[in-house]
Amino acid sequence: MTGSGPGREPPATNAPRRAWVEQIMGMPISVHLRGNSVGGAAAAAAVAAVFADLRVVDAVFSTYRADSDVMRLNRREVDLAGCHIDVGEVVELCDLARLRTGGVFDPELPAPDGGTWFDPSGLVKGWAVERAAAHLTALTGPEGLDFCLNAGGDVIAGTATDDSPAWRVGIEDPADLSRILCVLPLRTGGVATSGSAHRGAHIVDPRTGAPASALMAATVTGPSLMWADVYATAAVVRGADALEWLDSLAGYEGLVVSPDGQAFATPGFPVTPS
């Protein structure tokens, strides 16, 4: 969290706000800013940079674009050295994620036409959004703006001062998408949710090659959106012992929803699910 600068008033709850939305990576991505300079050139430039960064990530990592570096790598048209430099970084992060989750997170997954392929989607979105949010974090100092960046339900936020109000992040009930399970206050850090509510059983257990079905959803909050995203995906795969495992992760808290719609949270989760 960035401290307030000299002579700057903290944003109030009724401070000016502005939002921008673009469709990137197959999902709506929105930027919300709060503070007196939301209409300034610095804010506009930072928001444009966020969307530009995410469009590059989509072009490099999408498994739905035949011309992406990841798909060319999977077809063995190029090697890692022939890919965008970010691919090498993501490969290394995926190796670390595999280690941190005991192999429950693994980017080597069943390919649609048989065999396996490299699909880092379970890490890339959180990594890309967290990296792009650096443009917005830069506004919390000199511009005194609070920000909230939402990428298809994965959220990262930042505030300009210790007195800035928290953003409110609603967590959907995967058993009834018209209902909110709980609302998390978020002043800094990230919240990520993985599950089958919107995309069906798309999370694969790398140990079996079958869709993970022991949980409907998992939500994780903590200092890094990327790791919250990885841990949420891993929790869905782990199933029965996911809550105990999440409780063992320093700095992170989680909520899981069982197949019968019951919600359970770690002791330090910011709110109690309804």
Image (cartoon, rainbow, N blue to C red):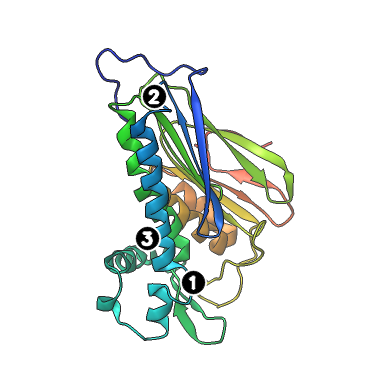
Q: Position of residue 199 (x, y in %)?
A: 64, 62
Q: Is residue 166 rendered to the left or right of residue 158?
A: right
Q: Is residue 259 above or below residue 222?
A: below
Above or below — where is 251 with respect to 11?
Answer: below
Ranked by sequence position, the earlier of labels 2 and 3 is 2
**Residue type for callout 3:** Arg
Tell me how far mark 1 sits from mark 3, CA to CA. 24 Å
Residue 28 location in percent, x, y?
56, 50
Badge 3 marks a residue whose secondary structure is helix
Give the answer, above or below, for where 255 lies relative to 81: above
Inter-mark Cα distance, 2 to 3 = 41 Å
- Label of residue 63 in the image: 1
> Distance between the Cα atoms at labels 2 and 1?
38 Å
Q: Residue furthest front?
A: 41
Q: Quadrant of residue 59?
A: bottom left
Q: Are marks 2 and 1 in contact (CB under 8 Å)?
A: no
- Which percent across, then down, holds residue 6? 24, 15
Q: Quadrant of residue 168?
A: top right
Which is more toward the observer, 28 or 173?
Answer: 28
Mark linked to residue 100:
3
Closer mark to the observer between disc 2 and disc 3: 2
**For mark 2, what is the residue?**
37
Disc 2 crowd, CA 10 A, few/some/many (<14, 14-19, 20+): some
